[in-house]
Amino acid sequence: MADPRLSDDELIRQIEAAREADRLADTTEPRARAARFEAAEGRVVVELKSGASFAFPPALYPQLAGASPRQLAVLEVSPSGEGLSWPELDVDIAVSGVLLRLLGPLAMYRELARTGGRATSSAKSAAARANGRKGGRPRKAARGEAHYPSMIRPHPGLVVREAPAARGPGAGSAPPADGEVRGVPPVEE
């Protein structure tokens, strides 16, 4: 059986590779360098290791909404920079989660697509050449046609009916008929 221990040279090589990966992540991932609560503005300001910064209102999170300015001022950044912590309130929030909540998932998908689109590989180059031989990139959809990532696209079978117009007091408040759910067509078996 082989000795599971690493040689000194291999260990040093792995440590250097890990440090380089960490340096790269500091510039490409949302990692906080510092954070503070600005009481006058009523917002938390986060400075990222990449040099960017952003701010958000504490009320964005129910756990912080009722906290006093003194409690909000006791704010710590995790050693990795990936989290914000309010020890007095026992609240921990991921920096990436704050950005996702501020920008929304579509903005994150767009950014992932943009950075992924810049990546180069032999497989991507080969696919581009094959596409070129077929006449190039497919045409974009007509204006006004919605494009959503498949994971948030509405189910194709979902049809929402408009509620009937109200006709006097109590109109439209009757319970749905057996087997019918308001706003969704009955399932045909």
Image (spheres, rainbow, N blue to C red):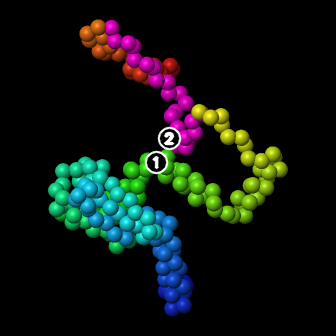
Q: Which residues are magenta?
A: 145-167
User: From the viewer's perspective, is 152 left or right of 144?
Assistant: left
Instruction: Work out which quarter of the rendered image holds the N terminus and state it.
Output: bottom right
Residue 152 is labelled as 2
Where is 171 relative to 160, above or below?
A: above
Q: Residue at x 35, y 57 (%)?
A: 55
Task: Give the alpha-carbon distance from disc 1 to disc 2, as whole Å.
Answer: 9 Å
Residue 39 is labelled as none
Q: Residue at x 58, y 55 (%)?
A: 114
Where is 142 relative to 127, above or below?
A: above
Residue 149 screen position, x and y as percent: 55, 43
Under mark 1, the amino acid is Pro
Q: Count residues near mark 2 (Cα–Cα under 10 Å), then give few for <14, some for 14-19, many for 20+.
A: few
Where is 68 relative to 5, above or below?
A: above
Q: Residue at x 52, y 43 (%)?
A: 151
- Location of residue 77 (image quadrant): bottom left
Residue 114 is a magenta residue: no
Say if residue 137 shows up in the picture: yes
Q: Which residue is mark 1?
A: 105
Residue 89 screen position, x and y as percent: 19, 59
Residue 157 screen position, x and y as percent: 53, 27
Under mark 2, the amino acid is Ile
Q: Say which of 4 and 119 sits in front.
A: 119
Where is 78 relative to 127, above or below?
A: below
* Labelled pair 1, 2 in contact (Cβ < 8 Å): yes
